[in-house]
Each structure stands twice: as C-alpha cells, then as structure tokens.
C-alpha cells in the first residue's frame, strides 16, 4: 500500500468512527514519512476528538516543526488550553496571529483566555480585532458589550447594543439588555421609550401582550398578575422561566406601573443569562 493510499484509507476509517484502526494506519504512515505534518495533525485531531488532549498536544507540537502555519499553531493553542497550560496557549495563539493576523478564531481564543483572568483591557483588544474582521459577529459583539458593562462604559455598551440590533433585530434579550443599560445610566425616559418600541415590534413580547389583553379589566389583570408572579416564583428554584418574567413585566405595564414593568423586564434577561451559564 503506497503512502497516499494508506493516508486516504486512514481518513476513511476516521470518518467511519474507527479511530483505533485509523490511528494504526497513520502511525504506519509516520514510520515511512516521519516529516509529514498532515499525518501528525491527523493523529492529533483524533486524540483531540477523543478528549485525550495531552497526546493531541504532543502531535500538534510535532506538526509545527514541519509546518509552522497559523492553523497548526491554533490547534496547538487549543490543545494547550485544554491541558490547562494557559500561558503556553497564549503564546501559541499569538504565533498563530503572527502567521495570519486575519484568523478570527485566534483573536477570540485570546479574548477568552484574557477574560478568564479578568484582564478586560486585553480581552477588549482582541474582541475589537475580531469585530474588525467580522463586524456582524454576534458572539464578538455580545462579549464586547459584556466588557463595556463590567467596566461601567455604558455609552459604548449602548452604542454596540444598537449596532447589534441592526444586524439581529429580533433578539429579545439584546433589546432587554439595552433597556437595562439605559436604566443604569439613569436615562429613564429613553429606557421607557425603548420599552414601548419593544412592546410594539418584538414578536415574542407582542405574543405576551396578546395573552395579557385577554383580561381587559383592571381587576382581572391584577388577578392574572398575582397568578403569574406566583408561577414565576415557583419556577425559580427548579426551572427558571424568563418568559414568565416578561409576562409579569407586561402586566405591570398594563397597570401603568412602569417601574416594576422595567424591573421584571431586566429580571427576565438576568434569568436568561443564568440559564445560559448553567448550560
């Protein structure tokens, strides 16, 4: 079996989920061609998929000896990070960017690593770099908004929220975050005005309004409000439900209580974030 045929057969076995058989063929390939970066990468990739990151790191390191490309440095950085070697991972990702400054994955990886150490300045630098490369990247914008919020730069956070919504106008949680930011800036008029826009245009909130509007008398609305609040309270311990918090917010709004309406709308976003972190 020639080298190329063996490599192709090993890739087929890998795709079929036969990792052990594929590894045997790849190792045979290395014996005949010990300078093959692609074979080292292939073996490292299998170990990475199996969660054996120490072995993956070993093979990615060898691949770099023969092909110090941006992609290979990135794969090494990922393996080092998974091994808990953050300092070496940072260096690998930096080498990746040195080879290819446009590799957005490396910018994001470095932003994550610096974020883990609460280095907001460097995290922001790499997030901004990523945003230059892809101005509509929702993940990058969300992370950068978080940095602005944590560093109390609410004006910048609001501006980026608004930019985010030009790309993704139907994301309810971002609208709620924008309302929360405006409230933290004590721009209550702007916050309540934007709430009105959300109530009018957002399909999820419109649906909740339609449900609330079934009770057209104040007494019935208050009864529904008490019921929804109890249901929300009971859900918090076991199964937090942001939609219930939005319903409570809308019912308060129908009663003319803007303060509590805004409070529960913000709480809905906080519940959503808590659920996302738990998962």
Image (cartoon, rainbow, N blue to C red):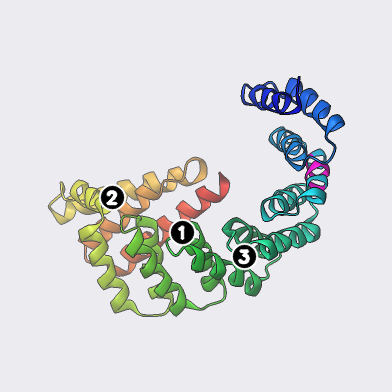
Depth check: 124 or 211 in front? 124
Between circles 3 and 1, the one closer to the viewer is: 3
Point out the stretch of residues depicted in magenta: 56-61
Q: Is residue 57 rendered magenta in the image?
A: yes
Q: What whole-number distance in Å separates the C-alpha atoms at marks 2 and 1?
A: 23 Å
Residue at which label 2 appears: 204
Residue 21 spot, x, y in % from top left = 75, 20
Residue placed farthest to the left in the image? 216
The first of marks 2 and 3 along the sequence is 3
Q: Dots 2 and 1: beta carbons under 8 Å?
A: no
Q: Which of the 4 image quarters holds residue 51?
A: top right
Residue at which label 3 appears: 101
Q: What whole-number distance in Å separates the C-alpha atoms at marks 2 and 3?
A: 40 Å
Q: Quadrant of the C terminus?
A: top right
Residue 208 spot, x, y in % from top left = 25, 49
**Element carrying mark 3:** loop
Q: What whole-number distance in Å separates the C-alpha atoms at marks 3 and 1?
A: 17 Å
The numbered disc on residue 137 is: 1
Which residue is located at x 33 percent, y 54 percent?
246
Q: Main secondary structure of the magenta part?
A: helix
Residue 57 spot, x, y in % from top left = 80, 45
260 sits to left or right of 51: left
């Amino acid at each position: 079996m020639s080298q190329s045929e063996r490599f192709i057969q090993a890739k087929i076995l890998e795709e079929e989920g036969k990792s052990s058989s594929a590894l045997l063929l790849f190792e045979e390939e290395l014996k005949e061609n010990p300078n093959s970066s692609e074979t080292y990468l292939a073996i490292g990739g299998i170990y990475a998929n199996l969660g054996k990151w120490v072995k993956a790191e070993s093979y990615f390191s060898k691949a770099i000896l023969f092909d110090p490309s941006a992609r290979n440095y990135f794969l090494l950085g990922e393996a080092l990070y998974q091994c808990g070697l953050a300092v070496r991972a940072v260096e690998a990702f930096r080498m990746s960017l040195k080879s290819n400054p446009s590799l957005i994955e490396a910018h994001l990886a470095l932003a994550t690593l610096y974020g883990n150490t609460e280095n907001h300045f460097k995290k922001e630098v790499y997030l901004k770099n990523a945003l230059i490369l892809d101005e509509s990247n929702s993940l990058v914008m969300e992370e950068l908004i978080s940095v602005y919020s944590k560093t109390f730069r609410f004006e910048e956070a609001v501006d980026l929220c608004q930019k985010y919504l030009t790309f993704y106008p139907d994301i309810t949680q971002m609208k709620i975050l924008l309302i929360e930011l405006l409230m933290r800036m004590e721009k209550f008029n702007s916050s309540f005005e934007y709430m009105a826009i959300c109530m009018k245009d957002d399909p999820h909130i419109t649906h909740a309004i339609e449900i609330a509007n079934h009770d057209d008398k104040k007494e019935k609305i208050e009864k529904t409000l008490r019921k929804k609040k109890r249901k929300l309270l009971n859900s918090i311990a076991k199964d937090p439900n942001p939609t219930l918090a939005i319903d409570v917010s809308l019912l308060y709004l129908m009663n003319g209580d803007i303060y509590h309406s805004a409070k529960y709308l913000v709480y809905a976003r906080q519940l959503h974030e808590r659920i996302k972190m738990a998962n």
